[in-house]
Amino acid sequence: MEPINIAVFGSSGAIGKALCIEFSKNKKINKIFALSRNGDQLNHQSIISKQVDYLNEDSLAETAQSLKCKLDIIVVAIGALEQPEKSIRDLSSDKFIDMFVANTIPTALIAKYFLPYLHRDRITKFASISARVGSIEDNELGGWYSYRASKSALNMVLKGLSIEQKRSNPDSIIFGLHPGTVDSKLSKPFQKKDKEYFTPEYSAEKLVSVIDAMTLQDNGKIYDWNNKIIPY
């Protein structure tokens, strides 16, 4: 089998960094491109760190060209959660814009410039970190309007990509991933004392297993860390 090349966006975050390290344990993997806004270096011979602006199309295009190889797996581990609305009274246009800029738009732009770099002669995978709270069917608590909406919109972007990509690259699988509630900078303000949280390392281990397990029948779907499907 030919060497496997992987790109992980958001490699400076807790989950993104842990994913890079988890992938590096696989001897079949040739290169892991660790892509982040600040270009943090990760100390491993197979990990190549690069700086990229997820919202700047010139930066994305230049970075994609700089890889000089085809990719097998792309994982987008980017997102933010800031002061989620407990009530409609807390809602603002600025918060909605911020959440879509953080959680939805980057995946769409990354797909625009990096999907063409996936192999076309074998199974390839494109995954983005979503969230269970983005599920419309699963929403029984309400609130968190802008964050929920941004993740629901992300799921729709992934669904659209999965349909379009299938026309030009039939062996491509595009899907969303819910990492569980991870002990990270993102979740820290909302953690409860009586609840256990995943370490980034544990979540990454589980997510890599889910990525490995994905088949063509899983195209366009959303899965959690335990490989259970999450409804739209």
Image: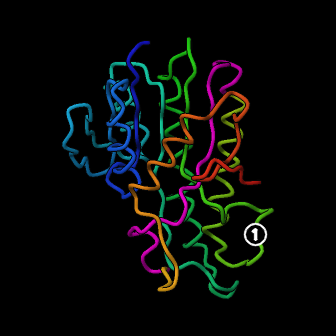
Q: Determine whether 179 is above or below 158 in the image.
A: below
Q: Which residue is mark 1?
A: 139
Residue 207, position as x, y percentages in the image = 51, 47
Residue 145, position as x, y percentages in the image = 67, 73
Quadrant including the N terminus: top left
Residue 179 lies in the magenta stretch: yes
Residue drawn at x 58%, y 21% as measured from the top left: 123
Kind of residue at disc 1: Asn
Q: Secondary structure at mark 1?
A: loop
Residue drawn at x 53%, y 28% as measured from the top left: 115
Q: Nearer the viewer, residue 102 or 180?
A: 180
Q: Nearer the viewer, residue 51 or 74?
A: 74
Q: Determine whether 72 is above or below 51 in the image.
A: above
Number of labels in the image equals 1
Q: Which quadrant holds residue 144? A: bottom right
Q: How is the image coloured?
A: rainbow
On the picture, is 136 further left or further right than 228? right
Q: Nearer the viewer, residue 200 or 157?
A: 200
On the picture, is 134 further left or further right than 47? right
Residue drawn at x 37%, y 23% as measured from the top left: 28
Estimate how packed mark 1 is, as few (under 14), some (14 to 19) or many (20 or more) residues with alpha carbons within 10 Å. few
Residue 111, position as x, y percentages in the image = 54, 36
Quadrant including the C terminus: bottom right
Q: Determine whether 230 is above or below 210 in the image.
A: below
**Furthest-right residue in view?**
137
Residue 194, position as x, y percentages in the image = 51, 85
Q: Which quadrant holds residue 51? A: top left
| Chain part drawn in magenta | 165-190
Q: Nearer the viewer, residue 213 or 41?
A: 213
